[in-house]
Amino acid sequence: MASTTRRAEARSVMALVAALRSGGVPVRDIALVVRDLDAYEEPLFRAAMQYGVTPVFWTQLRVTRTRPYALVESVCDALAGERVDRRTLLRPLEHRWAPASAAGHSWPVEPGVVQRAIAGLPDGARPVEEWVEVVATTDDVDARIGAFVQWLSDVPEPRPETVASVLGAVVEAYADHGLPETKAADAPALLATETDARAVVRVRTLVQQLRHKFAERVDDGSLERSWADVAELSSVIATQRPGRREHSNARAVDVLEANDVWALDVPYVVAVGLTATEWPQETESTLPPEFQEAVLRGAGSASTLAPSPAWTDGRDRDHFADTLCAAASGVVLTRHTETGGGDTVHPSPFLTALDTDSVSAGAMERLRSAERALPAPIRAMLSEAGGETDD
Amino acid sequence: MQREHTRADTLPAQVTLHVGAELELLDRARHTPRPTELVVAPVELHQRNVQRRLREAREPKDAFEFDDVVGVSRSVLRASDASTTAIDRIDRLTLVREILGESASAPSVSLPVGTGSHDPQHVEQIRTEVETITNYHPERIAAWEDAAGDLYAPIDADTAALLDTALDVERALRAQTAKAVSETELVRRATRELTATDGTAWTGAYPETERLSLMGLSSISATVADFLHALVAATTLDVHVYFREVTGEYLEQRFPSLFDIAEPGVEVFE
């Protein structure tokens, strides 16, 4: 299936998923596979919303973009400077800060209340201790805001134990009071809740790592005991890409990277982005290509040197073969033909070796329209598969 | 293409190479009191994919234990009461940055010329690539120098310089920390432990294991090859390596010669 741009391709893909589901294919029987999620996650997500499909992206959670992380970061920021302004001071409340011993439904502070408090406080940066008095003497400021500022003022200087206990308590209070807010506002598939819950788990781990790393850095003298350094260190830890992939959701369609498809068995696989720039992509190496070639050839003593097929397109060809192999009943390959700027995008060389049926432009339009008509070759694929599984 | 000479007979009989076919594992599923097969897959999601296939086939998981090579190495080291702590990439990059900073005033690391030569991430990548290809084994370091010498100028010198950079950085890292410089070093330590204990470190860690299946590979590092080499030399374990569909045919040919070195796990630094 060829579409014009990457966005159009993403819409075609999600229209296809919607049409397959209307045609009686269970959502768990479909998997979408891309070479690299970075370029496709956003367009696929938008298209999914448009066609009423719930996607789950099997990728590392970008923890820095989650609310629990933003909360921890904003607490460090509020503690970091000698003086802070009113926005920095109250930002943790925007990210649903709650006290460790909070009971009942009074936490987190409602967003409107926080905004009014920010508007009601005076401009200018002050030490937190001074803010305690300012907040206490300003009219119409919610008592919970006073309690928060008092808490901030009572936080001790950072030592490894205090980093872990202060931030740990912040995360646990978020799990108790912040997470239910996300759940209450979430769609029935609870995607946002799942992301938020995963983020809580990750930020918990991060706080533990932070404690150890902070202790080491203070010991070896490379860091000072300041909350600014704690914030800096937590961002370094959080932006490392762990080798772990996140969980799935039984009511959503899986979107996987090709490397992760190995050994899976799914009836229908949609391989997305079969363009010359996506499949294959070169793996960056610091070694000269001539040397790579000598190691790959392995003549003479070079035969003891370990070669990497990723220097050529070998790794990508493995992944593509795994993608085709994972499909028990049928594969749909999709690509786009131009960039957003209108330049031509060529098809992937991997396509030339395959014998495929193409879907006409008219059939693509009918698929993407309200009609959601499955193109003839895909209908044929379904009825063949149906014939096999009916017995 | 005719190979210059075949080295297929250098591969011990305990090692069997396969292309694809990893899911024959489903046929070996059965109820056992303890796992007898260690399934080693580098990507955690691959381990989960295999577990999902077992579930879909309604087969028991009992016979299998899943891990990656680093996890297995840690178990071996623990069985010998050896340290299993390694610094992680975050700490390593910090140390590399310090090393490069100190080296600017009193050169201790020879840096390649060109873009990114002072960027810790770039220098760390050089170090890991050299480690993957050579596992710092003296014979492979010599092979690198030979192969570099066969290239034309100036690529011959550039290639030799990359090796020097990696070895300098590795030495400097070791001088900075008492822990293992990386998890890869833990694998090498476990490799030497297997040899030094004549396999008792292995049986201590995995008394019931009869078979090791390494799967999901699109490449194989010198580090993993050396670990397997020491493992089959010191034990009677059956080792099966499953390559992937496309690269498998090439790697199957190329893999045996990685065993063409003496004393796997030994390093050029000693």
Image (cartoon, coloured by chain):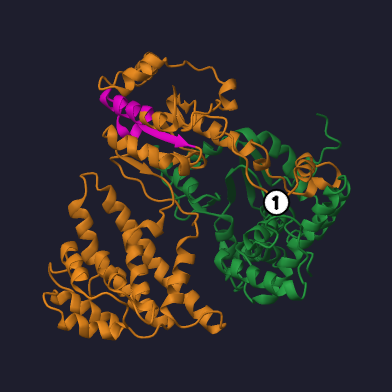
Chain colours: A orange, B green
Q: Is residue A130 left or right of residue A293?
A: left
Q: Is residue B36 left or right of residue B52?
A: right
Quadrant in which the C terminus of chain A is drawn: top left
Point out residue B68 in the picture as x, y percentages from the top left corner: 55, 54
Q: Chain of mark 1?
A: A
- Residue B195 can be seen, yes or no: yes
> What residue is shown with label 1?
A286
Give above or below for A310 relative to A143. Answer: above
Identity of the residue drawn at 42% across and 30% down: A269
Point out residue B221 in the picture as x, y percentages from the top left corner: 68, 51
Amino acid type at circle 1 is Thr
Identity of the residue drawn at 72% across and 66% down: B169
Point out residue B190 in the picture as x, y percentages from the top left corner: 65, 64
Give above or below for A196 relative to B91. Answer: above
- Residue B180 can be seen, yes or no: no
Identity of the residue drawn at 32% across and 23% down: A368
Q: Is residue A334 left or right of residue A319?
A: left
User: What are the residue bounds of the magenta stretch?
Assistant: A12-34
Q: Quadrant of residue A251?
A: top left
Give above or below for A310 relative to B94. Answer: above
Camera-side residue: B16 or A114? A114
Quadrant in which the N terminus of chain A is drawn: top left
Point out residue B136 in the picture as x, y percentages from the top left corner: 75, 60
Q: Classify 10 Å Cα crowding around label 1: few (below 14), some (14-19), many (20 and above).
A: some
Identity of the residue drawn at 70% across and 55% down: B115
Helix, strand or loop for the magenta stretch, by majority:
helix
